[in-house]
Amino acid sequence: MTEPTLIAGAVIPKNAVVSMCSAFVHLNAEIFLAPRMFNPDRWMKESSGEQGLHNYIVAFSKGPRACFGVNLAWAEMLQYLVLGNVFRKAELDLVNERTTYAAWRASLVLRYKGGLEVRVRTVRGAVTAR
């Protein structure tokens, strides 16, 4: 800062270095309900009382100095959110059982080596034609 600045009643002196810790935002109970609890459902809008939480994810920072890999990271995380939602709502059966599924293939985002074929039995909340 080039001049002293008043923020929330505190005077920040000229040339002071001001920073923040993302954990203080991510663990704030005024923003996130039960912030220390693992709750993937908080990101599923239809099942969560919490709305607009993406505005408070600051792990990658914000603005012009934000992490330039943020979009790649979100693409990686999105696949797990989508899969989590599928597993939460659908009843699935394995098509071909194998002895191992644990080999991963690296690509732009992680992909399961050899694929995983499943048959969808039912989907909770789905509309069916009669």
Image (cartoon, rainbow, N blue to C red):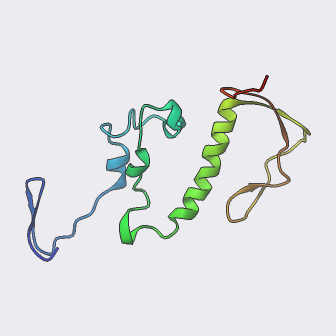
Q: Position of residue 76 (x, y in %)?
A: 61, 56
Residue in the picture at 81% in, 55% down: 113
Query: Which quadrant of the view contains residue 82?
Result: top right
Please tell me which residue lies in front, 39 or 126.
Answer: 126
Quarter of the picture containing the N terminus is: bottom left
**Residue 39 visible in the snapshot:** no
Query: Which quadrant of the view contains residue 124?
Result: top right
Query: Which quadrant of the view contains residue 11?
Result: bottom left
Residue in the picture at 38% in, 33% down: 33
| In this view, 127 is above or below 99 | above
Quarter of the picture containing the C terminus is: top right
Q: Is residue 125 left or right of residue 15?
A: right
Q: Is residue 61 left or right of residue 110?
A: left
Q: Is residue 117 left or right of residue 43?
A: right
| In this view, 121 is above or below 16 | above
| In this view, 28 is above or below 103 | above
Please tell me which residue lies in front, 113 or 45.
Answer: 45
Q: Position of residue 8 (x, y in %)?
A: 12, 53
Residue in the picture at 32% in, 56% down: 21
Please tell me which residue lies in front, 36 or 2.
Answer: 2
Q: Position of residue 112 (x, y in %)?
A: 77, 52
